[in-house]
Amino acid sequence: MNLDPSAFVADPELIKALDRHSLPIVCEEDRILFHQGEAPDGLYILNTGDATLSMTTPGGDSVVSMHVVAGSLLGLPGVISNQPYTLTAIAHNGARLSYVCRDEFTALMQTEPLLSLRILQVLAAEVSSARRALVDL
């Protein structure tokens, strides 16, 4: 399945707003940010560098593996739905990220509701990309 990496990218204003509530992370080696199936604890913004998103079947077969680009929001569906992450995210050596815990993210969405529309745009792009990928199967 081929997902469009740009589907995970947020507009600069949304990233700036999220960054004000984030903690910086610099990866000096490959680092697993979260595993598929884990309870969501936060959202990651890939500021620079490389990261890989992947999904496997319960039997361990690869469904999707893709590199994402700077500006990508990682873990967004899980944080919004409070459901387990559906992908595994690995940031690669040299990547710089920002981490927004779920409570900070929720508070930000409640205090700045216009940002919710920008979040919905990212989610809609992810859904559209997944649907296009399914059609291509």
Image: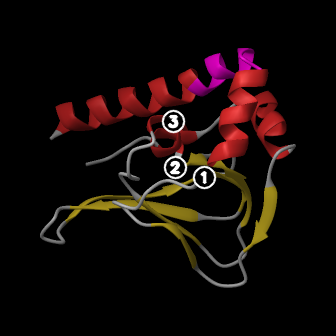
**Label drawn at residue 80:** 3
- Label 1 sits on residue: 42
Q: Position of residue 87 (x, y in %)?
A: 38, 56
Mark 3–mark 2 Cα distance, whole angstroms, equals: 9 Å
Q: Is residue 13 left or right of residue 44?
A: right
Q: Position of residue 31 (x, y in %)?
A: 58, 77
Identify which residue, 47 or 84, lies in the foreground.
84
Which quadrant of the figure has residue 59? bottom left
Helix, strand or loop at disc 3? helix
What residue lies at 69% left-to-right and 64% top-to-bottom?
Answer: 49
Mark 2–mark 1 Cα distance, whole angstroms, equals: 7 Å
The amino acid marked with disc number 3 is Ile
Q: Residues within 10 Å of mark 1 (few under 14, many from 20)?
A: many
What residue lies at 55% left-to-right and 29% top-to-bottom?
Answer: 122
Q: Quadrant of the C terminus?
A: top left
- Label 2 sits on residue: 75
Mark 2 or 1, closer to the camera: 1
Residues rendered magenta in the picture: 112-119
Looking at the image, how many numbered discs can be counted on the residues? 3
In the depicted structure, whether residue 68 falls above or below residue 15 = below
- Asked if disc 2 and disc 1 are in contact, CB closer than 8 Å, the reply is yes
In the depicted structure, whether residue 76 falls above or below residue 39 = above
**Residue 78 painted magenta:** no
Q: Residues within 10 Å of mark 2 (few under 14, many from 20)?
A: many
Q: Position of residue 134 (x, y in %)?
A: 20, 36
Q: Earlier in the sequence, mark 2 or mark 1?
A: 1
Q: Earlier in the sequence, mark 3 or mark 1?
A: 1
In the depicted structure, whether residue 71 falls above or below residue 126 = below
Mark 3–mark 1 Cα distance, whole angstroms, equals: 10 Å
